[in-house]
Image: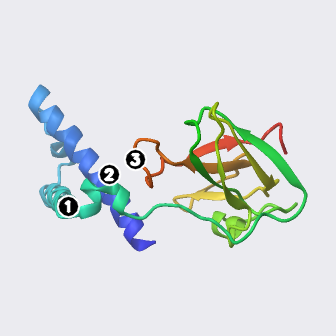
Amino acid sequence: MTTMYLQMIARLLLVIGGINYMTVYLFQKNLLNYLHYPILIQVITLAIGGAALYFAFNRDYYLPFLGKCVIPVGEGKPEGELKSIKLTGLPANTNVIFWAAKSGKNVVPNPMDAYGDYSNSGIVKSDNNGVAVIQMVCPTAYSVSKFGIINKQPHKHVHYRYELPEYRGIFSRVMTKYLENEC
């Protein structure tokens, strides 16, 4: 978890550095000079440079598909009152991995507990029209903390990835289907 937050901070520093470089180039204004604290400006500049060096030597920055990704598949099939959910707009005849929070009536305080052992997941294949029908139980609601300050409760949903037809074994980014009418 710590590495994930460090990478988020490093990316934010690169964005700040890029925007500052753009303003220096286009408007001859260094935004960091508005801080009026030379030591703070030096610390931020060194942090931006450190973030750039971190990513320059990070294999997963150049080859992100080799890094961590979510492919949670529980054992067996989901148990309980199964609902048929249609996923559309997929490539024809491709594998689709899906997962949703476990079933329940109470709001779960965090996503890790809501998904648990990923027992509400599976793999299906899309048909010739790019439609996949998944069998799952209606997921429970859960809260997501934004930077430890704001708790947000997303609508019930299912996540999925599909295998890219042109690159066997490589899956799409995470997609989300909201289940307002289905559950």
Q: Residues within 10 Å of mark 1 (few under 14, many from 20)?
A: some
| Local secondary structure at mark 2 | helix
Q: CA distance from mark 3 to mark 2?
A: 31 Å
- Label 2 near label 3: C-beta < 8 Å? no
**Location of residue 141 in the rendering, given as x and y in whole percent from the top left corner:** 77, 55
- The residue drawn where x is 23% and y is 38% is 19
Quadrant in the picture for residue 68: bottom left
**What colour scheme does the image use?**
rainbow
- Residue name at image x 55 percent, y 36 percent: 91
> Which residue occupies the foreground of this view, 8 or 77?
77
Front tag of 3 and 2: 3
Q: Quadrant of the C terminus?
A: top right
Q: Which residue is mark 1?
A: 47
Is 25 displayed left or right of 76 in the figure? left
Q: Amino acid at mark 2?
A: Leu
Of pointers 3 and 2, the one earlier in the residue sequence? 2
Amino acid type, callout 3:
Tyr
Query: In this rendering, would 51 be left or right of 103?
Result: left
- Report whether 153 appears left or right of 39: right
Task: Measuring from the top left, give residue 14's x and y in whole percent.
Answer: 24, 50
Decide: few, some or many residues near mark 2? Use Cα within 10 Å; few <14, some 14-19, many ≥20: some
- Residue at the disc numbered 3: 167
Specify which label sits upstream in the sequence, 1 or 3: 1
Q: Which mark is residue 12?
A: 2
Q: Disc 1, disc 3: CB below 8 Å? A: no
Image x and y of residue 82, in percent: 86, 55
